[in-house]
Image (cartoon, helix red, strand yellow):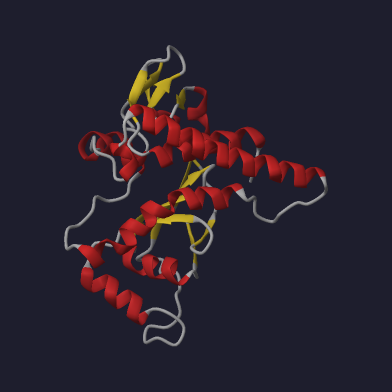
């Protein structure tokens, strides 16, 4: 499935503004964002040594912060235009799954499907809905919620379909975009991930400098980054994986 979609739906143009930057600008932005994320991790490490162990590691707040601009752009898009934005899919923010990585294997060969239940918190995790219908978005916002006609936000097992990417905890929405958008806006609601993929194995073969993704084996270019923000999130995921942050 990954191979099919990556060949037919990936676009060269990224879906974040940073895709339009020059190589130098991308690298500078990447370094600044990575410095920010690493500083948060280092301070958290210091607190851990002092016996302060948070229930939720602050690096996941940083990941959400980095992804907020893309999330906000999609949530607010229908206020400004009737043009539908591209679906938010992993290959539109990272790289094509059909790219060769090592020994003839492609990116999708290294995505590990996790058979474990994960609960995603719409108020805390980076969840990326892409509402496309003016009418449906209005109805969801107006009618979903405590004291509203459709009642408080609740998971709909038939409609909601969320794909979770680890170790970064990014929720890619496969179904239920409008009601999930309402939950994100209200800052409430939890739902179970229908599918979970861990990309940690890719870190042995791929790295980025913010401008391009490279193969570790020979430093050859896999692709230009489609989003500096998600290049940062990719590398922050490496630190999460190496440190065993849960």
Viewer-nearest residue: 41 or 179: 41
Q: How many numbered badges does the structure rendering display?
A: 0
In this rendering, position of residue 112 left or right of residue 92: right
Q: Quadrant of the N terminus?
A: top left
Which quadrant of the view contains residue 210?
top left
Please provide percent x and percent y for residue 21.
Answer: 31, 35
Residue 131 horizontal/vertical position (percent): 29, 62
Lateral position of residue 38 relative to residue 224, left or right: right
Would you say residue 108 is visible in this rendering? no
Q: Residue at x 22, y 66 (%)?
A: 133
Residue at the spot 37% in from the left edge and 66% down from the top edge? 181
Find the residue positioned furthest to the top. 218
- Residue lying at 49% horizontally and 52% vertically, measured from the top left: 65
Above or below, comparing residue 167 to residue 224 in the picture: below
- Residue 64 point in image, percent of width and height: 50, 52
Q: Is 173 drawn above or below residue 89 in the view shown?
A: below
Tell me residue 62's x, y (percent): 54, 49
At 39% from the left and 53% from the top, the residue drawn is 69
């Amino acid at each position: 499935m990954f191979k099919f979609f990556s060949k037919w739906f990936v676009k060269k143009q990224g879906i974040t503004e940073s895709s339009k930057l020059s190589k130098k600008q991308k690298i500078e932005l990447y370094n600044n964002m990575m410095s920010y994320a690493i500083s948060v991790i280092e301070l958290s490490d210091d607190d851990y040594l002092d016996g302060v162990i948070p229930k939720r590691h602050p690096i996941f707040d940083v990941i959400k912060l980095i992804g907020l601009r893309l999330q906000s752009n999609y949530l607010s898009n229908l206020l400004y235009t009737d043009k539908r934005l591209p679906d938010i899919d992993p290959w539109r923010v990272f790289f094509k799954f059909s790219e060769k990585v090592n020994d003839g294997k492609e990116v999708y060969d290294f995505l590990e499907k996790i058979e474990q239940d994960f609960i995603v918190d719409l108020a805390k995790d980076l969840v990326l809905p892409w509402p496309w219908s003016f009418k449906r978005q209005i109805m969801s916002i107006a009618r979903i919620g405590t004291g509203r006609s459709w009642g408080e936000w609740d998971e709909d097992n038939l409609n909601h379909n969320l794909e979770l990417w680890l170790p970064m905890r990014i929720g890619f929405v496969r179904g239920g975009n409008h009601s999930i958008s309402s939950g994100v806006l209200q800052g409430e609601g939890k739902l179970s991930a229908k599918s979970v993929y861990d990309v940690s194995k890719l870190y042995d073969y791929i790295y980025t400098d913010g401008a391009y993704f490279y193969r570790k084996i020979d430093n050859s270019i896999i692709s230009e980054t489609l989003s500096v923000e998600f290049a940062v999130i990719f590398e922050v995921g490496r630190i999460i994986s190496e440190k065993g942050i849960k």
